[in-house]
Amino acid sequence: MNIPITKPYLGIEEETAAVEAIRSGWVSQGPRVKEFEERLAEYVGAKYAVATTSCTTALHAALVVSGIGSGDEVIVPSLSFIATANSVVYASARPVFADIDHETCNVTVETIEKVITPKTKAVMPVHQMGLPVDLDPIMDLCKKRNLVLIEDAACAIGSEYRGKKIGGHGNIACFSFHPRKVITTGEGGMITTDNPEIAERLRRFRHHGMSVPDVERHKSRKVVIEKYVEIGYNYRMTDIQAAIGIEQLKRLPFIIERRRQIAEVYNRELKNIKSIRVPEIPDCAFHNYQSYWIELLDSTPVSRDELMQKLLDKGIAARRGIMAIHMEECYKKCYVPLPETEQVTKNTILLPLYPAMTIEEQAYVIQCMRELRQ
């Protein structure tokens, strides 16, 4: 077999929607972007949603419009894709790395409190691999300390914390629609918020700081001369992408249900292999299983990299677990010991999981794991 780590779940509906967008003549940011924003805001339970080119640009925009800049510190997990920390640097601020809870691979209020300084201005928890962080105590801490809270929800569309969808808790939250995420627009991101001023500034920021959106200018029966009221960026999503996103959002309930079914089979079939640990999900969290990870224990007969190679030799594409940003060359000046993060990044592997995965494909992955791990 040849089993990839993931596959986007796309069909004729997305193809048709993209073609219709192209034929409409409006292919840049336009009415379909607005519709996608409205549908996603309604889905997560937020008042506003603002589309961007990626989750990275969404995080950058969210930081800047929240007043984060030079001399400020933003607490982030090191156990995340490097874009989390990069977005802080783009805003001219300094990322400060917090350790994680080993069981969930997420930051906690305790790990955040350990690295707060007088320069701390914001906290950016990551719902890693789609598993929600324990938000309530972090929200309480930020309110008490007057800190900006921006959720890196790149992987967490459709996940829930205490019965409410991520993105709907009143904070700023940023999502990704990269092909490895739960739904995709090829590339793309979205910011949700309940704050009307933040939403308005985000719309300007993603459009060079322009005072009037293109759609309004084109609809107007009078000449409209736009103004540029602040420095912004070109972070606009296209209507072609949004057309795909609208169809993907319709598929989302099925996609999440299917991912959870596959994850449950993995949990059931792999938990008895003594040398690995399968995920344990807190009662407060509903997990979309954007990724499925296992941890190799000390009793493992092979290393992580050896196991990945053995699986690849059998046609199975596994991936290393989440990176530790503070151990990468470009962040070596920020290095501090983070023992839980360093152990998890060294010993975790992501296994294939995607909605179209067949029973035979998953059975083959499980069979190979049993053969290699016993």
Image (tube, helix red, strand yellow):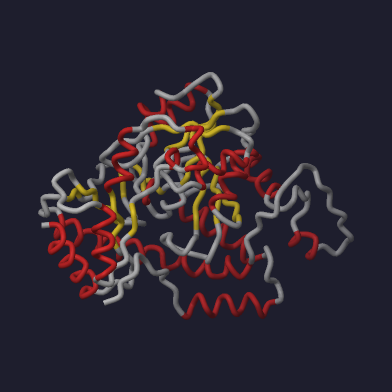
**Which residue corresponds to the image point at 56% horizontal and 27% vertical from the top-left?**
121
Depth check, front residue: 201 or 275:
275
Give the residue at the far top of this rendering: 118
How far from the left and from the top, in percent, is residue 154?
Answer: 46, 51
How far from the left and from the top, in percent, is residue 130?
Answer: 37, 51
**Which residue corresponds to the image point at 51% horizontal and 33% vertical from the top-left?**
333
Q: Is residue 174 left or right of residue 69?
A: left
**Which residue corresponds to the image point at 17% horizontal and 43% vertical from the top-left?**
298
Q: Is residue 329 left or right of residue 269?
A: right
Depth check, front residue: 234 or 190:
234
Task: Give the quadrant of the C terminus.
Answer: bottom left
How far from the left and from the top, in percent, is residue 257?
Answer: 31, 63
Q: Quadrant of residue 107?
A: top left
Query: Height in image: 7 above or below 89?
Result: below
How far from the left and from the top, in percent, is residue 282?
Answer: 26, 42
**Which residue corresponds to the image point at 62% horizontal and 61% vertical from the top-left?**
237
